[in-house]
Amino acid sequence: MTRAPFDVRDFGAVGDGATLATDAINAAIAVAHAVGGGEVVLPAGRWLSFSIRLLSGVALRLDEGCVLEAADPARHAGAYDAAEPNPFDLYQDFGHSHWHNSLIWADDVEDVAVVGPGMIDGVGMTREGPGSRWTRQAGEFPVSMANLSAEAMAILVPDLEAMAGHGNKAIALKNARRVRLEGFTIWRGGHFAVLATGCDALTIRSLRIDTNRDGLDIDCCRDVLIADCRVNTPNDDAIVLKSSMALGEARATERIEITGCHVSGFDLGTLLDGTQGRTQQLAPDQDRVTGRIKLGTESNGGFREITISDCVFTRSRGLALETVDGGVIEDISINNVVLREVTTAPLFLRLGDRGRGPEGTTRGAIRRVSVSNLTAWDILPDYAATIAGLEGHPIQDVTLTDIRLVYAGGGLAEWSARRPDDMAQAYPEPSMFGPSPAHGLWARHVDGLRLDNVRIETLTPDPRPPVLLQAVRAGRFDRLDLGAAPGVEPIVAEDGSDFILDGDTP
């Protein structure tokens, strides 16, 4: 027998945007859980709330015309649940280390859901939080932030005491099983619109997110589907997979499918109002606007069996696969991706050695990465597609097939002579190396690089070589169209690089 939904109005909630509904919503959830599960409904109205505690067997439905508004402790009588103690909070920032200080949170639950078509408005939450307590601090922040003042850093990375009573996540899930998030909108979702840590069998489908920091953060999770989502995040990553130490172990993020999603870096709020504004130029890290799909930076446990397909990036940084904290990235398949108005490198594979983890954390690895049917145009000329391993620890077995990269062009001739060092401990971003010495593809410390039907173009002439290889072993290149400027070698090979071109060794 189907149980009737639990309407929050029957528990005393008033959807007037002024009366706190926290207790009524939580009471409805508790009753639904006690009787074996059911659906708790927020009908049309504006429902003001602090922390909502989702319990096993309960689906929270936001009906058409429903706005769940995050209360503001500075204006409303109450506070968000305190950030719970976490003995494993040393190696990642405050936001990744706690879940209860959120608008909606669930801890050690199963068979839960939040479904639409209503909206979550995180107006009363903060997007900030302290950094990690890791003492070494090498690679803690991007190189692009090096010139920020102490005052600016204090705003971006406040003290722990400033977080008391505040919520900084719209939805936070920890150790949850069989979870469904579907059909609703998140507007200004705090540090994370959705943070899922240690979750198995998670489906995220048809969300619209227009938010002031991260969109979807999937950390140490397994068996996840992210489909048909639209995520706008000018200030941070849109869809990002992580594998931190927040659960006290190096747990891989694995068997993840991201498909049919569109990510962007439009001005905040202009995805939802349809204007797709392009006024903001820089993210808080002082690099260009973000809005991308990324693996990393938190990468202790690694990433396995990740599929990304049929996705679009607009006015955002390019696709990034990064491991710098000892984890392994392996068996990655990327197919049918389109990028427009690319604000850094269109593709960035980085094996580094930040080593933010327990004593004995060693360098990780990247191997068996396949990228096919990727088209990117109007790419910022500063940064080529980059595949950067480390000396003695090369990235292995990367295949790029049916790739078209169209750069704005106009790079400086002197950039061709640049040879940055490996910067092993630096925070991974394409800008970490400065302007690239090639305008199309720069590969260093790679074993087994296969290029097949790769086309590199510039909208205006660029004096740099299209391709630079440094310590690239066992390359195999077929059907290349590189469009080098007159007098410029199309492929510059250094540091013992070897490759076969169209079946012949050059």
Image (cartoon, rainbow, N blue to C red):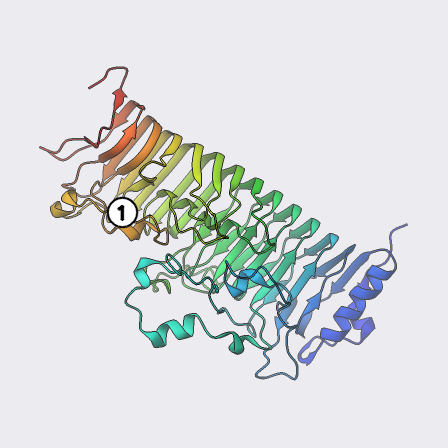
Position of 495 with respect to 162 (left or right) is left
Near-viewer residue (165 or 486): 165
Q: Is residue 77 left or right of residue 301?
A: right
Q: Residue 212: x percent and y percent?
A: 47, 65
In the image, 344: left or right of 53? left
- The quarter in which the C terminus is drawn is top left
Q: Position of residue 492 (x, y in %)?
A: 18, 32
Q: Is residue 26 above or below residue 444?
A: below
Decide if residue 200 is in sight here. Answer: yes
Give the camera-side residue of 152 and 122: 152
Task: Give the residue displayed 75% in from the left and 63% down from the top.
Answer: 41
Q: Nearer the viewer, residue 259 or 356?
A: 356
279 relative to 254, above or below: below
The residue positioned farthest toward the front in the image shown: 359
Looking at the image, which is closer to me, 112 or 361? 361
> Looking at the rendering, which quadrant does residue 482 occupy?
top left
- Is label 1 in a helix, a strand or a loop? loop
Rendering coords of residue 295 (x, y %): 47, 46
Residue position for label 1: 383
Q: How many marks?
A: 1
Tell me if mark 1 has few (under 14), some (14-19) or many (20+) residues whose alpha carbon lies within 10 angstroms of its own. many
Q: Residue furthest top?
A: 503
